[in-house]
Amino acid sequence: MAKIKPLRENELFKDFSDKEIAVVSQIVSEKVYPKGTPIFVENMLGESLFIVKSGSVEIKKNLGAGGDNLVAVIGPGELFGEMAILEGGPRLVSAKAQEETELLMISGDDFKAFMEKEPVVCLKLFLGIIKMFTRRIRELMPLAEEFLSWKSKKK
């Protein structure tokens, strides 16, 4: 039950029935990260999707000589690291607990095994992740337009 409420409150699972949420909760594990603890670092192999149950996580991108730049702060009910269960490549950013943070996790391995048992629920999860990607791309478009405008003026 402790895992079901945070799943229910997450945008990714908004169209899931109570039964589907209960099914997904079977592959969810929980872990507490003390303040300042790295969750993962840029370029390490991605292996889990995370949902913040409590606390907050800072997401940073290393820009070489420019150091680490804050990309986002992820709070309760939000998720990050979803690309890991889709393709498992290297992490594009680093994530660190900004305060004591409790996370729910779905590992890529557990998700792959789950696909065989619950393909319909997994398809629904994939579609939810695609919707999130689409929303994030739309939100980033003004920034991309600004960059392209700056780049064309620089020529």
Image (cartoon, rainbow, N blue to C red):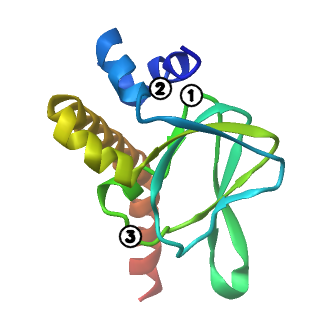
Using the image as rendered, state which of residue 47 and residue 127 is in the foreground. Answer: 47
Q: Which residue is mark 2?
A: 10
The correct choice, above or below, for 85 with respect to 105 in the image is below
Quarter of the image where the N terminus is located: top right
In this rendering, the label closer to the viewer, 3 or 1: 3
Structural distance between the alpha carbons of marks 1 and 2: 5 Å
* Dot 2 alpha-carbon crowd within 10 angstroms: few under 14, some 14 to 19, many 20 or more: some
Q: Is residue 74 visible?
A: yes
Tag 2 secondary structure: loop
Which residue is painted at 45% across and 59% down in the image? 47
Q: Which residue is mark 1?
A: 77
Hey, what amino acid is under mark 1? Answer: Gly
Q: Is residue 60 left or right of residue 17?
A: right
Quarter of image, res 83: bottom left
* Dot 1 alpha-carbon crowd within 10 angstroms: few under 14, some 14 to 19, many 20 or more: some
- Mark 1 and mark 2 lie on one chain; the one further toward the N terminus is 2
Question: Residue 12's x, y, as percent?
Answer: 38, 30
Question: Residue 31's x, y, as percent?
Answer: 66, 41
Q: Which residue is mark 3?
A: 89
The correct choice, above or below, for 18 with respect to 102 in the image is above
Structural distance between the alpha carbons of marks 3 and 2: 24 Å
Q: Are marks 1 and 2 in contact (CB under 8 Å)?
A: yes
Quarter of image, res 51: top right
Tag 3 secondary structure: loop
Using the image as rendered, state which of residue 147 and residue 129 is in the foreground. Answer: 129
Hey, what amino acid is under mark 3? Answer: Gly
Q: Is residue 17 visible?
A: no
- Mark 3 and mark 2 lie on one chain; the one further toward the N terminus is 2
Quarter of the image where the C terminus is located: bottom left
Tag 1 secondary structure: loop
Hey, what amino acid is under mark 2? Answer: Asn
Question: Residue 55's x, y, as percent?
Answer: 74, 35
